[in-house]
Image (cartoon, helix red, strand yellow):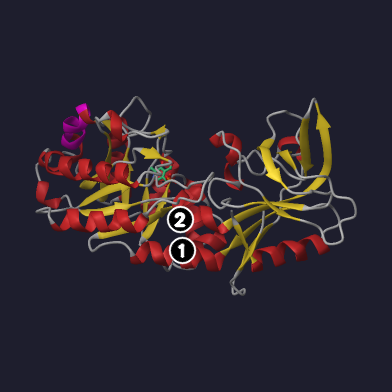
Amino acid sequence: MHELPTAVAAAIEAARAHSADPLALFVYDLDALRRHVSLVMAALPAGVELYYAIKANSEPQLLATLAPLVDGFEISSGGEIERLQACPTAKPFVFSGPGKLDSDLRAALQQGVEAIHLESLQEIARLQRLAQQAGRVQAVFIRINPELPPTLSSKLAMAGTATPFGIDEAQLAQAVALVDNASHLRLQGFHVHALSHQLLVERHEQLLDFYLQRWPQWKALSRRPESLTHLNVGGGIGVDYLGTQQFDWRRLCAHLGRRLAATGEAPILRFEPGRFISAFCGYYAIEVLDAKTSHGKHFLVCRGGTHQFRLPVAQGHDHPVIHLPKAGQPAPTPPRAWTVVGQLCTPKDVLSRDCPLGAVGIGDILVLPLAGAYGYNISHADFLCHPRPPQLFLQGQVAGGVPCE
Ligand SMILES: Cc1ncc(COP(=O)(O)O)c(C=O)c1O
């Protein structure tokens, strides 16, 4: 059962009262975000850093909340650099991702990017040229696509198999030699972002152990191994959308602490999670416009839809739904398994199938929690020219929770 914080429920009610049309909006609980990230950071062992991957959600209010708490940010485009420039607290940032534009790389160099993660042999030569033009010696990480044991992969593999990301381990010696020979690049370490949606802490422990075991061999490829200090182990920590068994971050950190203490010449380790940082603070609230039965299936047609919250279709899951009945609702329908859909003219516009809810009436609100990462920002919001949903950012509200269906 998911809980809706009192402040979030109150904000939704207030928005409904002021809205001429039925409601579709996002609410972000910035106090909850701050509490969550403080705990995440407090669990990190000595010698481990955390950069937030802003692709998960780069709304200015989230970045302003996170900046004083995290060690830095990971970005993947010139647009994301602009988001950081607008952030009131300046933090170090690193730049990864395939297909970087020259203009984005120039902007990163100009803005004092801490490190650039190199994704191909061609990119090494290109960055050398741009860094030379900028008159700057740029710290870089080589992103590796390692040979991974099959047991260590996940639902969304980004390494250990054929992907456009990073440089295959078989080509690593060549890549290191290219960087070693580049007058305006300085190899600072390696980067591996191998997967997303990791919910199994044991598997993630094994993955990090595997990287740490490989580190001395990777480092030894360089002519100056002593100058390699960092191993970026990516993000990929999953969120349990369908249950309540969230990833045991403290256990992972405790394991890492023991492992690093037992490792001679351990690198500084850097995490760069996105989803696990911002998912929990976001809620997508939609109002029920219609209730109907078709060929034996019961549908709730709601304001908004997957053009505003594509996450459930992107993941292929049925999103959890919290029901907020409208006060004084006259004739509610009987309890049923409802399929929750949006306003789009496509049968793919489904947020949750066969969702067991109580008596639902027109005008009730359904709230989809865990909507703070890869929610609104990965959605095709202009489809059908519906207006974009408002986004509310709550701060300094009274904490608390009301149990809901
Ligand atoms: C290079 C890199 N780092 C970090 C992340 C964040 O991953 P997640 O949100 O799964 O933690 C991504 C996501 O695609 C990525 O591509």
Identity, as a three-letter code, of the amino acid under mark 2 = Ile
Q: Position of residue 310 (x, y in %)?
A: 62, 39
Whether residue 360 is visible to the viewer of this picture, yes or no, is: yes
- The correct choice, above or below, for 30 with respect to 329 in the image is below
Horizontal arrangement in the rendering, residue 167 relative to residue 286 (left or right)? left
| Residue range (magenta) | 170-177
Give the residue number, with chain letter if any, for mark 1. Answer: 36
Q: Secondary structure at mark 1?
A: helix
* Residue closer to the observer: 76 or 182: 76
Q: Quadrant of ligand 1?
A: top left
Residue at point 50% right, 55% down?
278
- Residue ID at (74%, 49%): 358
Near mark 1 (Cα within 10 A), the count class, few <14, some 14-19 or many ≥20, is some
By secondary structure, the bulk of the magenta-drawn segment is best described as helix
Q: Quadrant of residue 336?
A: top right
**Is 247 a magenta residue?**
no
Asked whether 329 or 106 is in front, the reply is 329
**What kind of residue is marked 1?**
His
The yes-or-no answer for disc 2 within 8 Å of ligand 1 is yes
State the residue position of label 2. Answer: 277
